Image (spheres, rainbow, N blue to C red):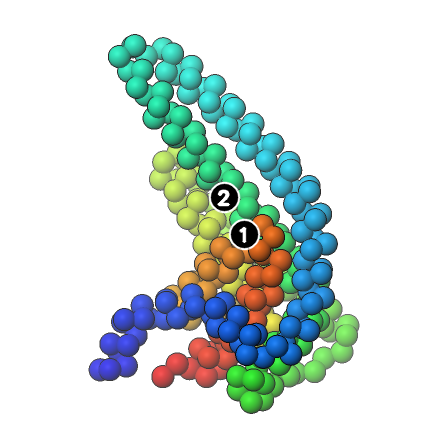
């Protein structure tokens, strides 16, 4: 009874899953020796961020401005044909345009942060792997490792990225078509795309631990779904952290560390 009540009050792990980046930060503070494992990944993130933010963010900002201009012109023309007594609608339209611009900027930052994570985690994998091993040793007192040769490791890494692309295509393409239907279709497409992005982010940050056991992609995905809603809140918080420019240079390693702690606590050693 007490265990069930604890689960209900904790949202069946929802609140606990969201706290793991903070738990990782506390672990770093208590174990300063871990910082050496994130020095090079942070440098890698800075290099990748310069390329992404100087390119993708610049052109993305132009697209946002273009969409805003077209939308403003269309809405102003629409209001111009309305009776004069409906002039107050211009204020509503201005607010609506500002809200749409804000949403577009948020989407742009999320997309840029997502790409930064994909490249940063991939390029920093050797150091993140060592960090994950140290965290597992701290948390459980041992490290489980399935040894493979370099060629096999490289092959698994490439295959993992390809399977992620397949997942994105299988889910993302239908969502694009659903988006063609205004109203409900747009809502479903937006929620679906956000859920897909959160799932991929969650997979990436749990992967340092899971890949060390050479688990197949479907098993990794099953672990994410089996541990909902904790994995959902974990992925959501991580997605927010990696979407903040400059701050994400540090939060990406933090989220990688929190993924290992999450698995150690909630998967390999089930919560009581």
Quadrant where the N terminus sits is: bottom left
Instruction: Please indicate, yes or no, whether residue 169 appears anywhere in the rendered image.
Output: no
Residues packed near mark 1 inside 10 Å, few (<14), some (14 to 19) or many (20 plus): many
Q: Which image quarter: residue 162?
A: bottom right
Residue in view at x 46 percent, y 60 percent: 237
Residue 4: x percent and y percent? 26, 78
Residue 168: x percent and y percent? 55, 53
Residues packed near mark 2 inside 10 Å, few (<14), some (14 to 19) or many (20 plus): some
Quadrant where the C terminus sits is: bottom left
Nearest the viewer among 231 and 24 is 24
Q: Which image quarter: residue 125?
A: bottom right
Q: Are marks 2 and 1 in contact (CB under 8 Å)?
A: yes
Report the side of 121 relative to 227 (left or right): right
Residue 241: x percent and y percent? 52, 57
Q: Which image quarter: residue 95?
A: top left
Q: In the orientation shown, which residue stands out farthest toward the bottom?
A: 141
Q: Earlier in the sequence, mark 2 or mark 1?
A: 2
Nearest the viewer among 208 and 91 is 91
Residue in view at x 67 percent, y 62 percent: 42
Residue 158: x percent and y percent? 69, 63
Q: Which mark, residue 243? A: 1
Nearest the viewer among 131 and 246 is 246
Element under disc 2: helix
Report the side of 69 relative to 47 (left or right): left
Residue highlighted by disc 2: 106
Residue in view at x 44 percent, y 50 percent: 192
């Amino acid at each position: 009874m007490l265990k069930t009540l604890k689960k209900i009050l904790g949202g069946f792990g929802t609140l606990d899953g969201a706290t793991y980046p903070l738990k990782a930060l506390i672990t770093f503070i208590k174990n300063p020796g871990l910082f050496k494992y994130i020095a090079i990944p942070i440098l890698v993130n800075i290099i990748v961020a310069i390329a992404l933010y100087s390119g993708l963010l610049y052109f993305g900002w132009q697209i946002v401005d273009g969409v805003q201009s077209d939308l403003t012109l269309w809405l102003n023309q629409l209001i111009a044909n309305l009776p004069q007594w409906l002039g107050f609608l211009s204020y509503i339209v201005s607010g609506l345009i500002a809200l749409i611009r804000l949403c577009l900027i948020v989407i742009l930052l999320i997309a840029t942060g997502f790409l930064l994570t994909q490249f940063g985690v991939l390029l920093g994998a050797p150091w993140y792997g060592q960090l994950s091993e140290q965290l597992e040793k701290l948390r459980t007192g041992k490290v489980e490792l399935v040894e493979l040769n370099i060629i096999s490791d490289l092959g698994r890494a490439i295959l993992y990225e390809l399977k992620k692309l397949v997942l994105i295509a299988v889910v993302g393409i239908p969502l694009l078509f659903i988006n063609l239907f205004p109203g409900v279709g747009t809502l479903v497409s937006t929620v679906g795309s956000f859920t897909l992005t959160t799932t991929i982010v969650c997979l990436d940050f749990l992967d340092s631990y899971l890949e060390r056991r050479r688990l197949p992609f479907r098993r990794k995905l099953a672990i994410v779904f089996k541990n909902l809603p904790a994995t959902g809140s974990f992925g959501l918080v991580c997605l927010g952290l990696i979407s903040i420019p400059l701050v994400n240079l540090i939060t990406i390693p933090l989220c990688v560390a929190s993924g290992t702690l999450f698995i150690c606590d909630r998967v390999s050693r089930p919560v009581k």
